[in-house]
Structure formats: structure tokens, C-alpha cells
Image (cartoon, helix red, strand yellow):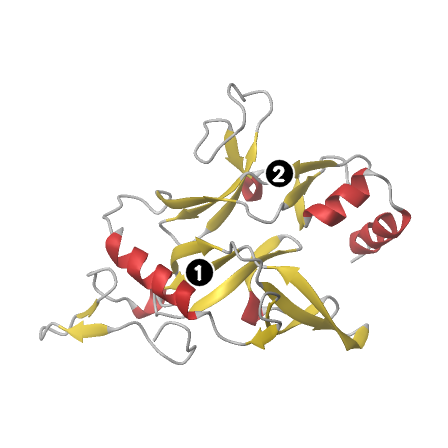
Amino acid sequence: MGSDSNNNTPSIDKGDGQVVDLFTGKTWNPDEASKIIRIAPELDGLEMLYSNDANPDKLFSMKILCWALNQNGEIDAMVPWLSRLVPCRELNDPLNGHWEGYFDNFHEAVFYDAPLHKVVELESSASYYDAEYTTEQDTIQEIPDPIGTHAVLTGDKFQTITLTQVTSWRLLNNGAIQAMLADSEKVENTPVLVGDESLYAAQEHTDFKYFFHHIIANKIKAGDPEAMAAFTRLLDL
């Protein structure tokens, strides 16, 4: 259950042909099996390990943003990757990366399934906070960004760019997860916290292009030659 990608959500047949999800108490719909229903921020510094074709003998790491529970009971970590938020196991970009596992710095251990404490957290909270929502755009959760993600915005084909820190991540009833940015012209209170009225979804902004880790974002802001060269190569993709 939970961390095994071959397992399904615990369910029960009501006897009338309908299968009910034991996490949510709702009728299970196979068409929505991969829909994300709950997220939990990664607060212990666990990382995703990945390799790429340009450096086949090396492993790279990236901080995990959160863990996500799907309607079918599968759990995977999520990372901001280029212009999308992706499940780690689905990372299969020939140029930029392939998922190789997870890494726990504290125990200096590599592992391949969601840790038990995250499985328990996600499954318990999905059941405890179950509610009825009226539209697909209703907010189920909103969590602060724990890894310093930045969004790249440009309206002139990268002649000028704006790097904006992601304040939070909002899980909608349709399973989408939006990166929330603060509109500086609408900010009335600081710090800008989860749920602030000045927040808007990066993915819905016409100028949004990519996500960057805060270390790379700060190097780009400072004009670091290696970071700028890598950013330039990215624009050529």
C-alpha cells in the first residue's frame, strides 16, 4: 500500500457495481487513477538522484519539493523541472535527466520508494481532510515552497527576464499543482504567506517559461558566467 507503485488504493465493492475509495469514501473512477489528491512538503532535505546522457558516469541530485498521493494510491516525489512540476519516477528527458532513485543525506542512504512516514502522513491526511468540492478549480491544499524555487518570466523572448521566488504550491481539485507567485503591485502585507490575495499561478501567466532552484537563480541574478552559459544553452533547446 502507498509506496509500492504496483498497488492500488484500498477500496471496497458496495455490491451495486460501484467501487469506493477507502481514503476518500468516494466512488473510484479508473479514468482519474493518476489524479493527485494530497501533497506533503519535503522538510527533511531528501533529494532526487538523476543522471543525464551528457555525463553517463555521474549522478546528480535535486531537492525534493513534496510528495504526492495519487487517486490510485501511488506515491511519488515531485520536483520542478524546466517548465513543469513532475513526478520523479516519470523523469525521462534524454538530454537533461533520468530518475535514478532518492537520497537521504542524514542516513547517507539511497532508496527507491516513498519513506514510510510520508506514506502515513499522506494517507492519513487524505482521509482526515476529505471534503466535497464544487468545481475542478477549488483549492484542496496550499503549501509553502520549502526549496527556494524561482520562476523565470519574460515577455520579450528572453531579451529581459524576471526571476521571481515561488511563494507556495496550490493543489486544485482537478489534481493540478500551481506555482504561486506574488504580484508586487498587489502586495499589502509582508511577508507574503500562503493564501495571500496577491498570489497568482505562474503556469497561467503568459510570460512564464521555466523553474530554477534558488542556487541557480541567484547565480543568474549575479551574472555568474557558468550559470549564464547553462541558461543560454537552455534557450537553444
Q: Label 1 vs label 2: CA separation?
A: 27 Å
Q: Considering depth in this image, is 126 or 35 the residue closer to the camera?
A: 126
Q: In this rendering, would 104 be left or right of 160?
A: left
At label 1, counting other C-alpha atoms closer than 10 Å, the crowd grade (few under 14, some 14-19, many 20 or more) is: many
Which image quarter holds the N terminus? bottom left
Dividing the picture into quadrants, the one containing residue 205 is top right
Expressed as whole percent of the image width and height from the top left, the position of residue 81 reads 64, 57
Residue type at tag 2:
Thr
Name the outermost residue toward the front: 107
| Residue found at x 41% / y 78% | 4
Q: Is residue 212 above or below residue 205?
A: below
| Residue found at x 80% / y 43% | 220
Expressed as whole percent of the image width and height from the top left, the position of residue 48 reads 61, 66
Q: Considering depth in this image, is 55 or 173 the residue closer to the camera?
A: 55
Does residue 206 appear in this view? yes
Residue type at tag 1:
Ala
Q: Is residue 81 above or below residue 204?
A: below
Q: In this rendering, would 64 be left or right of 67?
A: right
Q: How many marks?
A: 2
Does residue 34 appear in this view? no
Q: Considering depth in this image, is 134 or 120 the residue closer to the camera?
A: 120
At label 2, counting other C-alpha atoms closer than 10 Å, the crowd grade (few under 14, some 14-19, many 20 or more) is: few
Cβ atoms at labels 1 and 2 below 8 Å apart: no
Expressed as whole percent of the image width and height from the top left, the position of residue 6 reads 40, 81
| Residue found at x 24% / y 60% | 24
Residue 206's label in the rendered image is: 2
Circle 2: element type: loop
Earlier sequence position, callout 1 versus callout 2: 1
Q: In this rendering, would 180 be left or right of 156?
A: left
Residue 68's label in the rendered image is: 1
Expressed as whole percent of the image width and height from the top left, the position of residue 100 reads 63, 75
